[in-house]
């Protein structure tokens, strides 16, 4: 392959030269017999051959070089992408080890304090709460890491069942209002939106995974809001149900909007990591929604808030 170009170009030159000498000699002998005219024609023939082969070789070499340039550029692009992916993974691992160490250190530290003398029962209860909270954080993180690995391998399975949407929203609301993120920001109004329908509405989805998506989106809504309200629920749009999670938080700057669904991309933290974060929540949610046949989208305005939403067909 590496040497094919010189072989090809030499072959073209030799074959073209051979054919030219063979046929052009015959041709000029057909049109002229005078020795002087023949000599003249031989000279023109030589010039003509040089001119034509020169042009052919020029365009042939040009095409070859262009092809090589394109291949080289493709290789450089592929190499740059591989290097970037490698750097992203290294940065991701460094961030992840930080995210694991932080709750782990709290757990170990407070577990140690509980066994020590000199703390009141009230203080020990607080230490237990912290251990509990940090333990849950760690569990959540480990689940996220397993999820993202399974998503990457295409191993996440969805168990679709008919889900009563009103029950689901109520369940998510009742469980999430006890979440430390909600308790930590009591000034933010947390509410659910369930339209008043006579009959119950159902979607076909995986209840566990759907709750996981709400959990991720609601966590973000609280993490990236300092005031105002967080509202979630659903609306009916003809034959489909559109779920939404809306906040009045800091919004997402335009320069990172195209990154927020990307895995391992630390640049999406450009507008700060208020409560820490792994950058896994949105990529996982997006993949889960897609596995259930929807598409996770958002609208946002910097300084005013964001709304994440996805639609699913109504279960008939
Ligand atoms: P994490 O929240 O752990 O950083 P996510 O994947 O959930 O990771 O979110 C990725 C990024 O998208 C966040 O770091 C943040 O920059 C941005 N983001 C997500 N949700 C919101 C939101 N509701 N308001 C503002 N920014 C958000």
Image (cartoon, rainbow, N blue to C red):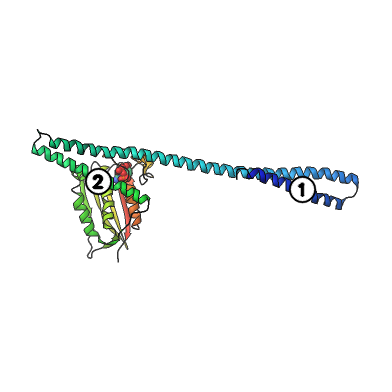
Seen at 26% across and 37% down, the residue is 101
**Against 200, is 180 above or below?**
above
Ligand 1's quadrant is: top left
How far across and down, in percent of the image, does residue 31 sit? 86, 52
* Left or right, residue 132 beside residue 26: left
Q: Is mark 2 within 8 Å of ligand 1?
A: no
The foreground one among 174 and 239 is 174
**Distance in Å between CA atoms under marks 1 and 2:** 78 Å
Q: Relative to residue 99, is residue 291 depicted above or below?
A: below
**Residue found at the far right of this picture:** 34
Most extreme residue toward the top is: 118
Residue closest to the eye, 300 or 316: 316
Q: Which callout, 1 or 2, points at the residue further toward the start of the chain?
A: 1
Residue under numbered circle 1: 18
Q: Quadrant of residue 248?
A: top left
**Residue 94 appearing in the image:** yes
Please tell me the numbered disc located at residue 139.
2
Rendered residue at 9%/39% (across/down): 122
* Classed neighbour count for the residue bearing mark 2: other residues with Cα under 10 Å, few (<14), some (14–19), many (≥20): few
Element type at marker 2?
helix
Rendered location of residue 147, percent (x, y):
31, 49
Query: In this picture, is 129 found above or below 30?
Result: above
Residue 294 visible somewhere in the drawing? no
Q: Nearer the viewer, residue 297 or 147?
A: 147
Task: For mark 1, give the secondary structure.
Answer: helix
């Amino acid at each position: 392959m590496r040497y094919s170009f010189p072989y090809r170009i030499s072959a073209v030159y030799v074959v073209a030269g051979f054919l030219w000498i063979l046929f052009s000699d015959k041709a000029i002998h057909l049109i002229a017999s005078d020795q002087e005219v023949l000599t003249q024609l031989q000279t023109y023939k030589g010039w003509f051959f040089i001119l034509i082969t020169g042009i052919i070789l020029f365009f042939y070499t040009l095409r070859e070089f262009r092809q090589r340039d394109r291949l080289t550029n493709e290789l450089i692009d592929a190499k740059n992408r591989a290097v970037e992916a490698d750097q992203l993974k290294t940065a991701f691992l460094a961030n992840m080890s930080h995210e694991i160490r932080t709750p782990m250190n709290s757990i170990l530290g407070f577990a140690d304090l509980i066994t020590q003398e000199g703390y009141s029962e009230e203080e020990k209860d607080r230490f237990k709460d912290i251990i509990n909270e940090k333990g849950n954080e760690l569990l959540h993180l480990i689940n996220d890491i397993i999820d993202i690995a399974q998503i990457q391998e295409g191993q996440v399975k969805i168990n679709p069942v008919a889900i009563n949407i009103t029950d689901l929203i109520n369940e998510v609301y009742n469980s999430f209002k006890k979440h430390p993120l909600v308790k930590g920001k009591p000034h933010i109004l947390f509410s659910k939106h369930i339209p008043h329908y006579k009959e119950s509405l159902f979607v076909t989805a995986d209840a566990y995974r759907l709750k996981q998506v709400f959990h991720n989106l609601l966590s973000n809504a609280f993490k990236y809001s300092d005031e105002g309200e967080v509202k979630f629920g659903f609306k009916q749009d003809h034959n489909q149900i559109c779920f939404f999670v809306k906040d009045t938080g800091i919004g997402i700057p335009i320069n990172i909007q195209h990154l927020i669904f990307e895995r391992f991309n630390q640049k999406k933290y450009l507008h700060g990591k208020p409560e820490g974060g792994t950058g896994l929540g949105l990529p996982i949610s997006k993949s889960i929604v897609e596995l259930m046949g929807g598409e996770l989208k958002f609208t946002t305005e910097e300084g005013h808030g964001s709304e994440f939403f996805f639609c699913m067909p109504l279960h008939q």
